[in-house]
C-alpha cells in the first residue's frame, strides 16, 4: 500500500503527502480535543460533553459558561500548549543529537528551569509571575551552558547528551542545596511547583505561552526540511546548501525557549518531551523529526494524563507530573532495554 502521494495545490505546485503520518496527526488532534472536552466536564460540578460544547459556543447557562471559560478552559489550554511545546521541543533535541535519549528531561533543561524558579522562591519569595520568569531564565541559561560546553567544531550527537547529563547533575545538586537552605513554607511551595501541575492555571499562563508558540512553531516548521537533510550528515548537508550550525543554533534556541516556557507555565512535567517524539515516530513509521506528529502527541499525552490524575484516584487528585513521571519512567526503562539490545548503547 502506498503511503506517499503527490497532492497538487492551486498555482501548479505539488506537495508530497505521507498518508499514514497525516492520518496519525488527525487522529491525535481528535484524541486531544476529545480528551479536552471530557476534562472540561470533570470536577465538582460535572458536565456532559454536549453541555461543554454548548458552553464553548456561548449557548450554555450563565453558570456553565463561567465554569467552562473562567475555571476549566484555561487549565486545559495550558495543558495542550505545554504538551505541544514539550513534544516539539523533545523532537528537536532528539533530531539534533540523533539520539532517542536526547530530550530536555535528560539534558537538564527542566532542572535548569527548576533552579531558576527555586532561586526566586527561596531567595526572593517571589510571586507566581516572578517564579515563571525565573524558570524561563534558568532554562535559557542552562541551554546556553550546554550549547557552549558541547561546542567543538559544531554540536554533535553523544557529546551533547553527555554534556547535558553532566550539567543536569550539577544543577540538580544546586536545587537540593536551595531546598535545604529554605524555610519550611518556601520549601513546601517549591516542592509543589517541582512536581509539575496544572492546578490553578488561568488565562495569565495561557496568553504568554500561546504567543510564544505562535512565533516559534512556524519558525521550527519552516526549517523542518533542512533539519531532515542534516540527518544525512553535516558534509552532505553543507554540500546541499544547508548552513548546519546556524540551523542547529536557531532550532536549539527555539527548543530551549519552548521547553523553558512550558516549564514556567506548569512546572517540570517530566518525560513528555522524551516519550512524545518516540511514540509519534512509531505510529507514523516515518523518518525524520516528525515535528507536527510529536507536537500533537505531546498535547494528547498531557491532557490524557491530567484526565487520569483527576479521575483514576477517587477524591485524591494527583498532580499531572506524577502521572507522566510514572508512565515516562516505565517507557524510559523499555527504551534503554531496546537500545541496548540493538547495540546502540
Image (cartoon, rainbow, N blue to C red):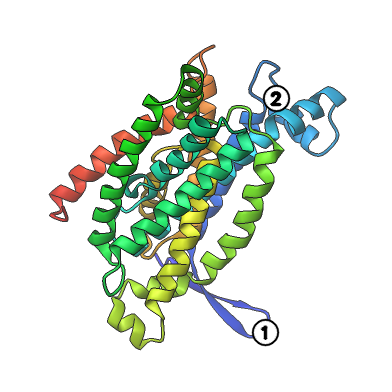
Q: Which mark is residue 21?
A: none
**In percent of the image, x 51 and y 13: which residue is there?**
316
Taking 123 as reference, is 33 left or right? right
| Res. 194 image quadrant | top left
Taking 204 as reference, is 123 left or right? left
SS class, disc 2: loop
SS class, disc 1: loop
Please tell me whether residue 261 is drawn above or below residue 306 in the rendered image.
Answer: below
User: Whole-Å distance between the Cαs marked 1 and 2?
Assistant: 45 Å
Q: Position of residue 271 (x, y in %)?
A: 38, 40
| Res. 157 image quadrant | bottom left
In this orientation, does residue 164 appear?
A: yes
**In percent of the image, x 46 and y 49: which residue is there?**
139
In this orientation, does residue 299 appear?
A: no
How many C-alpha atoms fall within 10 Å of the one at disc 2: few (<14), some, or many (≥20)? few
Q: Residue reaching furthest top?
A: 315
Q: Which mark is residue 11?
A: 1
Q: Nearer the viewer, residue 202 or 27?
A: 202
Residue picked out by circle 2:
48
Q: Position of residue 275 (x, y in %)?
A: 37, 45
Q: Who comes first in sequence, dot 1 or dot 2? A: 1
Q: Position of residue 120 (x, y in %)?
A: 52, 36
Asked if the residue under mark 2 is in contact with the one under mark 1, i.e. CB atoms within 8 Å, the reply is no
Q: Nearer the viewer, residue 277 or 206?
A: 206
**In percent of the image, x 34 and y 88: which residue is there?**
239
Taking 215 as reference, is 338 left or right? left
Amino acid at each position: 500500500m502506498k503511503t506517499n502521494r503527490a497532492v497538487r495545490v492551486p498555482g501548479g505546485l505539488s506537495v508530497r503527502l505521507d498518508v499514514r503520518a497525516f492520518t496519525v496527526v488527525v487522529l491525535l488532534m481528535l484524541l486531544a480535543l476529545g480528551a479536552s472536552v471530557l476534562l472540561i466536564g470533570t470536577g465538582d460540578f460535572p458536565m456532559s460533553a454536549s453541555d461543554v460544547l454548548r458552553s464553548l459556543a456561548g449557548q450554555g447557562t450563565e453558570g456553565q459558561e463561567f465554569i467552562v471559560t473562567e475555571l476549566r478552559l484555561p487549565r486545559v489550554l495550558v495543558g495542550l500548549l505545554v504538551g505541544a511545546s514539550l513534544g516539539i521541543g523533545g523532537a528537536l533535541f532528539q533530531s539534533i543529537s540523533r539520539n532517542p535519549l536526547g530530550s530536555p528531561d535528560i539534558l537538564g533543561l527542566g532542572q535548569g528551569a527548576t533552579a531558576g524558579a527555586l532561586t526566586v522562591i527561596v531567595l526572593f519569595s517571589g510571586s507566581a509571575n516572578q517564579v515563571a520568569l525565573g524558570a524561563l531564565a534558568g532554562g535559557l541559561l542552562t541551554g546556553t551552558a550546554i550549547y557552549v560546553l558541547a561546542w567543538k567544531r559544531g554540536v554533535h550527537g553523544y557529546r551533547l547528551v553527555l554534556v547535558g547529563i553532566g550539567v543536569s547533575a550539577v544543577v540538580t545538586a544546586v536545587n537540593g542545596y536551595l531546598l535545604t537552605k529554605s524555610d519550611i513554607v518556601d520549601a513546601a511551595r517549591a516542592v509543589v511547583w517541582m512536581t509539575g501541575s496544572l492546578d490553578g492555571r488561568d488565562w495569565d499562563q495561557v496568553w504568554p505561552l500561546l504567543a510564544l508558540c505562535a512565533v516559534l512553531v512556524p519558525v521550527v516548521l519552516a526549517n523542518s526540511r533542512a533539519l531532515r537533510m542534516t540527518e544525512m550528515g553535516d558534509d552532505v548537508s553543507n554540500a546541499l546548501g544547508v548552513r548546519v550550525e546556524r540551523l542547529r543554533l536557531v532550532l536549539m534556541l527555539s527548543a530551549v525557549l519552548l521547553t523553558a516556557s512550558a516549564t514556567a507555565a506548569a512546572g517540570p512535567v517530566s518525560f513528555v518531551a522524551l516519550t512524545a517524539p518516540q511514540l509519534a515516530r512509531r505510529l507514523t513509521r516515518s523518518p525524520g523529526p516528525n515535528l507536527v506528529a510529536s507536537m500533537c502527541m505531546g498535547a494528547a499525552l498531557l491532557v490524557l494524563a491530567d484526565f487520569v490524575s483527576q479521575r483514576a484516584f477517587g477524591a485524591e487528585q494527583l498532580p499531572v507530573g506524577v502521572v507522566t513521571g510514572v508512565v515516562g519512567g516505565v517507557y524510559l526503562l523499555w527504551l534503554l532495554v531496546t537500545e541496548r539490545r540493538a547495540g546502540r548503547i
